[in-house]
């Protein structure tokens, strides 16, 4: 089935919000939950209020309920990086986020929902758990995007959230110790622990995305301080990783890029998709790159309708429908959009022809 459908989630400037930014999404059944930061004032990364907002769909992202504020800044807190994860075995949904104190340090929180995102618990501060192995790093941000749950293997059901770390912003760039790690749970979110291994110091990794491919291994892609994106792999469910190396996907804008694996969908088991801003000099023109071999090479490309893509961030989910569909949060022309793109439309038949 060929399909490309866009639905507007938010418009920049509406409701006194200067910028909607840093998006995350999860999908289960026909339910889609889309999250973002609602930034006020100048829309800066820090120093101004950010709320955590959500829109909810029960028809696979074709339409959405009105936007709700999940966590309020109370006019003073800079709430950042909403990162959701859904536990398919228990039906619980978790949302991680941070309170950014002037880019110098962060507090780390989690809320949860047991009814598909209709209601949410009070925030729980998990900063101490996250920082156990992080001294002397003061700054931690989840994601962005969404976390994953492992399927199969020795740690079936494990929940994984990427997080990045550095010293405070006043430390010179070369001494900030940029790196990434993973926060995990093996008891369906009752407790969380940080995998002790840190990754990406040499390439100054920060924002990152993780996916499980059809062979059970994990692929971790890392944003760096340059225009190249790096990647590494794990064969032991995220405990140890290969050394990150540049991805052979060409340079792009120095911006976050989403990652999703389609493992588990008949006919598309080895399909891995990456969304990014293609224009180097400014955040304009979103594109989807796709791999037919589990993320080892990205040989396919789909250009989305061109235009200003500020703020340039995106997130993707695979919708649980009979005909495989990709859900994509992205921006164009001052609107944040949720696009439904069938995998047939994305690959143009390339995946089937490669078999």
Image (tube, grey):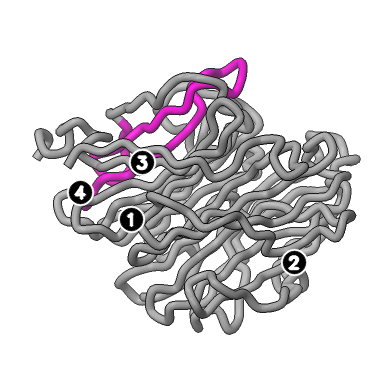
Q: Residues within 10 Å of mark 3 (few under 14, many from 20)?
A: many
Residue at the top extreme of this rendering = 281
Q: Percent from the top left, x then y, of residue 345?
A: 24, 35
Say which element carries label 2: loop
Q: Which residue is mark 3?
A: 273
Under circle 4, the secondary element is: loop
Can you give x and y, in whole percent of width and height, for residue 261 in the image?
Answer: 34, 51
Q: Secondary structure at mark 1?
A: strand
Q: Nearer the viewer, residue 300 or 311?
A: 311
Upstream in the sequence, badge 1 or badge 2?
2
Q: Residue at x 56, y 18 (%)?
A: 280
Q: Earlier in the sequence, mark 1 or mark 3?
A: 3
Q: Which residue is mark 4?
A: 268
Q: Quadrant of the N terminus?
A: top left
Asked if the residues shown at circle 2 and circle 4 are in contact, with their CB atoms under 8 angstroms apart, the answer is no
Residue at coordinates 47% horizontally, 49% vertically from top-left? 220
Q: Which residues are magenta?
A: 269-298
Q: Which residue is mark 1?
A: 319
> Would you name the residue on which mark 2 appears?
131
Query: Which image quarter: residue 320?
Result: bottom left
């Amino acid at each position: 089935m060929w399909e490309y459908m866009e639905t507007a989630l938010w418009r920049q400037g509406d409701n006194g919000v200067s910028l909607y930014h840093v998006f995350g999404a999860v999908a289960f059944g026909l339910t889609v939950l889309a999250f973002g930061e609602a930034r006020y004032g100048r829309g800066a990364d820090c120093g101004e209020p950010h709320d955590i907002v959500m829109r909810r769909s029960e028809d696979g992202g074709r339409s959405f309920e009105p936007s709700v504020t999940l966590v309020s800044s109370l006019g003073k807190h800079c709430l950042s990086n909403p990162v959701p994860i859904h536990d398919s075995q228990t039906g619980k949904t978790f949302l991680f986020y941070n309170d950014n104190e002037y880019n110098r340090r962060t507090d780390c929180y989690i809320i949860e929902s047991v009814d598909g995102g209709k209601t949410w618990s009070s925030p729980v501060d998990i900063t101490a758990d996250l920082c156990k192995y992080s001294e002397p790093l003061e700054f931690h941000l989840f994601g962005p995007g969404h976390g994953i749950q492992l399927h199969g293997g020795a740690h079936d059901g494990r929940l994984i959230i990427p997080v990045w770390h550095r010293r405070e912003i006043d430390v010179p760039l070369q001494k900030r110790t940029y790196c990434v790690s993973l926060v995990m749970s093996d008891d369906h979110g009752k407790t969380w622990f940080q995998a002790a291994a840190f990754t990406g110091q040499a390439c100054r990794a920060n924002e990152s995305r993780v996916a499980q491919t059809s062979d059970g291994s994990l692929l971790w892609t890392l944003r760096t301080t340059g225009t190249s994106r790096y990647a590494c792999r794990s064969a032991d469910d995220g405990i140890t990783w290969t050394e990150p190396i540049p991805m052979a996907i060409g340079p792009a804008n120095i911006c976050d890029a989403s990652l999703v694996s389609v493992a588990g969908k008949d006919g598309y088991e080895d399909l891995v998709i990456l969304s990014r801003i293609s224009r180097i000099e400014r955040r304009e023109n979103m594109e989807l790159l796709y791999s037919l071999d589990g993320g080892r090479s990205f040989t396919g490309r789909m250009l989305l309708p061109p235009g200003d893509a500020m703020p340039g961030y995106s997130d993707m989910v695979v919708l649980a429908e009979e005909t495989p569909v990709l859900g994509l949060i992205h921006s164009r022309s001052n609107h944040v959009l949720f696009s439904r793109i069938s995998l047939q439309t994305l690959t143009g038949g390339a995946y089937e022809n490669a078999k």
